[in-house]
Image: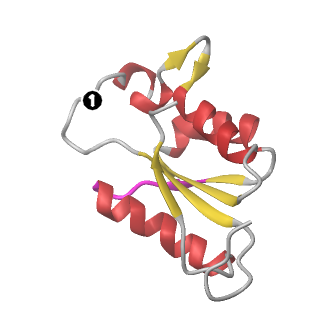
Amino acid sequence: MWSVKGDFTKLPAIVVAGTSEGYRPVGIEAGGKAMLRLDGKPLVAMVVEALVNSPSIGDIYVVGQEAYLKKSVEDYGRGRAVTIKQGSNLVENVMLGYERARKESRTPYALVLSGDMP
């Protein structure tokens, strides 16, 4: 267990899985790169599942196109992961996730990772 100036036993995780406006990303037909499948499972589902299985991770905030992400997040998040509607760019998406995490967590820290890297 880790601790930084307090009793922070679970670190919130922010998974950025959005797409950029005006850009045609790889996997757009599936909903973006994070929704591409590997062994039949969306990449973002693999990330969420790994986070859920980590004893050091608390709540999980997946930022992206909710219409595409919601089912995978619900199926693999075991009640610990939620989707957040994406902003217009990567920095805004990180901040949207961080703002939500700060409202619901006791720690000012968060793990930020990509939703398309299983």
Q: Which range of residues does the magenta coloring cover? A: 83-89
Query: Which residue: 68% across, 82% down?
Result: 106
Relative placement, left or right, of 67 versus 92 is right
42 vs 115, left or right, is right
Q: Answer above or below: position of 9 versus 14.
A: below
Compared across the picture, whether 9 is left or right of 91 comes to right
Q: Position of residue 116 (x, y in %)?
A: 44, 34
Between 35 and 110, the residue placed more toward the observer is 110
Asked if residue 86 lies in the magenta stretch, the reply is yes
Position of residue 39 relative to residue 24, above or below, is above
The residue lying toward the viewer, choosing from 41 and 19, is 41
Residue drawn at point x = 50 percent, y = 75 percent? 99
- Residue at the right extreme? 78
Q: Is residue 18 above or below residue 5?
A: above
Tell me the SS state at disc 1: loop
Which quarter of the rendering shows the N terminus? bottom right
In this orientation, which residue lies closer to the viewer: 112 or 8? Answer: 8
- Amino acid at dot 1: Pro
Residue 86 locus on image (x, y percent): 42, 54
Residue beneath label 1, please?
25
Q: Position of residue 49 (x, y in %)?
A: 69, 37
Question: With 63 as the anchor, is 56 left or right in this view?
Answer: right
The residue sitting at the left extreme is 22
Instruction: Give the colour scheme of this rendering.
Output: secondary structure
